[in-house]
Image (cartoon, rainbow, N blue to C red):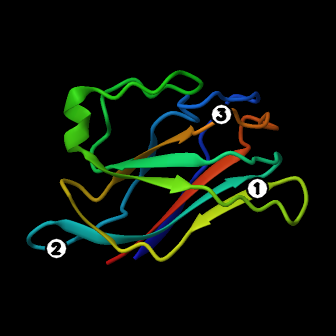
Amino acid sequence: GAYTEDVPTVTAATYAASVVMGGIMTFANMLATNAIDNAGVLTNIMLKFKGSVQTVGFWVAIFDTSPGGTFTDHSAAAIAAGDTAYLLGMWHLISPSSMLGTHTIYTLDGLTHEIVGPTTSLFAVVVPDGTTGSLASTSDMTLGIGVVW
């Protein structure tokens, strides 16, 4: 299996609901290759903010092909009709923890979402469901995805 994190470049500011944070993130080599297909089971998603306290929820959309819609950092999300075929699902992260100080972590464990993709890569987009707290830096956000084979 694989657990991979991506630290996209974000805007050190607030984000409104449904505004893309960090653009399209690529997670290479997440699915196992065998003689038939590229497969795996999504087991967990972790979203971290290393220097800001967040209290809103976040949607994480995962695709098996890089979407062609508009998913530019700090712009409104705009999925293209053809991208819906690549969308594996959207997961809502709603339980923030900032118990260790000025940071926030969202963890969604226990997922069992089976994936068969055209390649071994997965792609993700993060959007908040409300106005975020101001991000502390352009590297404040990290998204992690876990897959077992």
- Which mark is drawn over residue 133? none
Mark earlier in primary sequence (3, 2): 3
Q: Is residue 140 above or below residue 122?
A: above
Circle 3 SS class: loop
- Which mark is drawn over residue 34? 2
- The residue carrying mark 1 is 104
Mark earlier in primary sequence (3, 1): 3
Q: Position of residue 5 (x, y in %)?
A: 56, 58
The residue located at (51%, 46%) in the rendering is 59
* Image quadrant where residue 48 sits: bottom right
The residue located at (36%, 61%) in the rendering is 29
* Horizontal side, residue 55 vs residue 42: left or right: right
The residue located at (31%, 35%) in the rendering is 67
Q: CA distance from mark 3 to mark 1?
A: 16 Å
**Between tags 2 and 1, which lies in front?**
1
Along the viewing direction, whichever of 74 and 97 lies nearer the viewer: 97
Q: Residues within 10 Å of mark 1 (few under 14, many from 20)?
A: many
- Tell me if I can see residue 101 in this picture: yes
Q: What's the residue type where badge 1 is placed?
A: Thr
Along the viewing direction, whichever of 103 and 36 lies nearer the viewer: 103
Q: Which quadrant: the C terminus?
A: bottom left
Q: Position of residue 112 (x, y in %)?
A: 36, 74
* Image quadrant where residue 139 sits: top right
Q: CA distance from mark 2 to mark 1?
A: 38 Å
Farthest residue to the left: give it. 36
Q: What's the residue type where badge 2 is placed?
A: Asn
- Tell me if I can see residue 32 in this picture: no
